[in-house]
Image: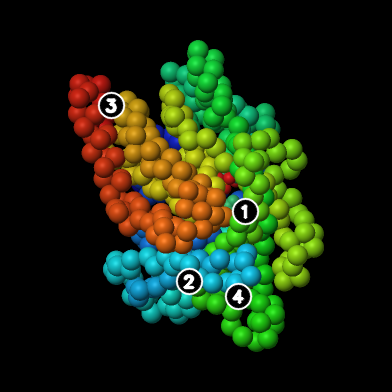
Amino acid sequence: MPAPITPPPKLRMAVVGGGIGGLCLALALSKHSDIQVDVYEAAEQLKEIGAGVIFWERTWEVFRSMGLSDDLTEVSGAPIDPKPSVGFDYFRSDSPNAGHQFAQFKPPCKLLGLTKRLLHAEIILQDGCIRFHRAHFLDVLIKHLPEGIAHLKKRLLSYEDTDHGITLNFADGTTASADLLVGCDGIKSVVRKQMYEAEAAKGDPKLLQFIDPVWSGTMIYRALAPAERLFEACNGRRHRIMDDAAVYCGKNKHIVSYAVGKGATTVNIVAFATNPEDEGKTYDGPWVTGCSADEVRNHFVDQPLVWALHCLKPLPFYTKGQVTLLGDAAHAMLPHQGVGAVQAIEDAYLLAGLLGDAAVTKDTLQHALHAYEATRLPFANARMAGSRMNGLMYEFNSEHGDNYETLAPAITSQWNWQWENTAEDEVQKALLLMRGRIKTMPVASRGSNQ
Ligand SMILES: Cc1cc2nc3c(=O)[nH]c(=O)nc-3n(C[C@H](O)[C@H](O)[C@H](O)COP(=O)(O)OP(=O)(O)OC[C@H]3O[C@@H](n4cnc5c(N)ncnc54)[C@H](O)[C@@H]3O)c2cc1C
């Protein structure tokens, strides 16, 4: 019998960058059999640098609907638990009365139909959040990625956006073509650079300010420490950090710490040191480099890294023509809320939700990209502002100073957006917007799916 003829895909997508954003987008798109996805990653392998990553119930719901939650539970340090729980404890830690707690963030815990398996999973920590070693988290994404769609050692140099589609030019001299290019290539995105340079050249030079990331004036020291060293240092006592995430606040410095890994075997430590006057200045030197254990004054950790913390200015647009931006390429933010990856994941979930809709064809694609930008840009830009504000508050540099009466509620209310609606609500909002605009098109011009 002759093999069945597979219809050509309605869209060919090029995803540039195989970080959390790019892989989540590829995974979400791969559920739509009429969309062809190719991921082009510059590195020799898909990998994450850095240490821990933390997610809340809102993002967990996205993982569940993407079919990732069971495998993620296996590698997590803290499966989400439906009981009331602590999100973060905040301590004043730079005064003679070191260590007094001044705020506590407790996420509202709704029982959102957790899977039976999750409810019976070994509950190690009960914090309403789920924490991962980044490498383990990425391994789960890679495991779910359909075979043959990730192309490694493909560093994008430039692209051409023509009436016939996109051509991608790689550093190895090869090219590829697609109907839509999504730049998931991180904070130093070449896709963003080319897009903004091209628009600036049309007469709006102000747009050039959105290309280069801005130094925040903060250096961060990141490391993972084996949990047993903490036990030793505490003379066998279980340190509170093993159970609840904490932020230790001080003037111009703060430390975020929580346990990660199955069985909470590892402690994630991120220490921030800020010179507020340096915000916006140019940082000379590598952004990420190894540093001596002396520099972070600890003998608990292995291979500490020091990072010069950069972020973007909030972008005015994500999309031009058949090219759009996603994740850190679109909104690299300060990590003081730990939601940069969360935004990349919601970008991916929403964009895939739009592109997978039956109303989307090559001819209606612009309306999907419009709805993506109109929904995600204001949302993610608000998170950028909130993350910066958290950093100011954690180091007593906000308008609240160290007035705990106003500072504590200001810190905890920063999390409200996570529970005001869901990522799925945002997808539905964007779908309504897109379908409304497509309906205004003459039927004959909506493409073959109509
Ligand atoms: C200290 C710290 C703690 C954080 N903690 C959290 C947290 O707890 N929770 C959270 O949600 N977020 C957190 N974040 C933010 C989060 O890490 C990022 O927002 C997220 O990893 C961004 O993912 P991305 O895929 O957009 O970009 P990236 O991870 O930067 O991935 C970009 C990919 O593109 C590739 N690439 C780059 N250029 C090219 C090119 N020209 N061609 C092809 N490929 C290319 C890169 O190799 C890379 O694989 C934290 C950030 C920091 C700094």
Q: Secondary structure at mark 2?
A: loop
Mark 4 vs 1: CB contact within 8 A: no
Mark 4, other Cα within 10 Å: few <14 / some 14–19 / many ≥20: some
Task: Tell me residue 19's x, y (percent).
Answer: 55, 48
Gap in angstroms between the C-alphas marked 1 and 3: 56 Å
Categorize mark 2 by other alpha carbons within 10 Å: few (<14), some (14-19), many (20+): many
Residue 422 - label: none
The residue under the point 62% across, 66% down is 95
Helix or strand or loop: what does disc 1 sit on?
Answer: loop
Look at the image and name its color scheme: rainbow
The one nearer the camera, 269 or 226, is 269
- The residue that mark 3 highlights is 447
Please tell me which of labels 2 and 1 falls first in the chain.
Answer: 2
- Give the alpha-carbon distance from disc 2 to disc 1, as whole Å: 30 Å
* Measured Cα–Cα span from mark 4 to mark 1: 30 Å
Image location (x, y in percent) of residue 420: 30, 54
* Sequence order check, earlier mark of 1 and 3: 1
Quarter of the image for residue 192 reads: top right
Q: Cα distance, mark 3 to mark 4?
A: 54 Å
User: Crowdedness of circle 1 by 10 Å Cα count: few (<14), some, many (20+)?
Assistant: some
- Using a 10 Å C-alpha cutoff, classify the residue at mark 3 as few (fewer than 14 neighbours), some (14 to 19) or many (20 or more): some
Percent across and percent down for residue 311 are: 57, 41
Q: CA distance from mark 3 to mark 2?
A: 47 Å
- Nearest-to-viewer mark from 4 and 1: 1
Residue picked out by circle 4: 265
Q: Quadrant of residue 109?
A: bottom left
Residue linked to disc 2 = 78
Q: Which mark is in front, 3 or 2?
A: 2
Quickly name the residue at label 1: 252
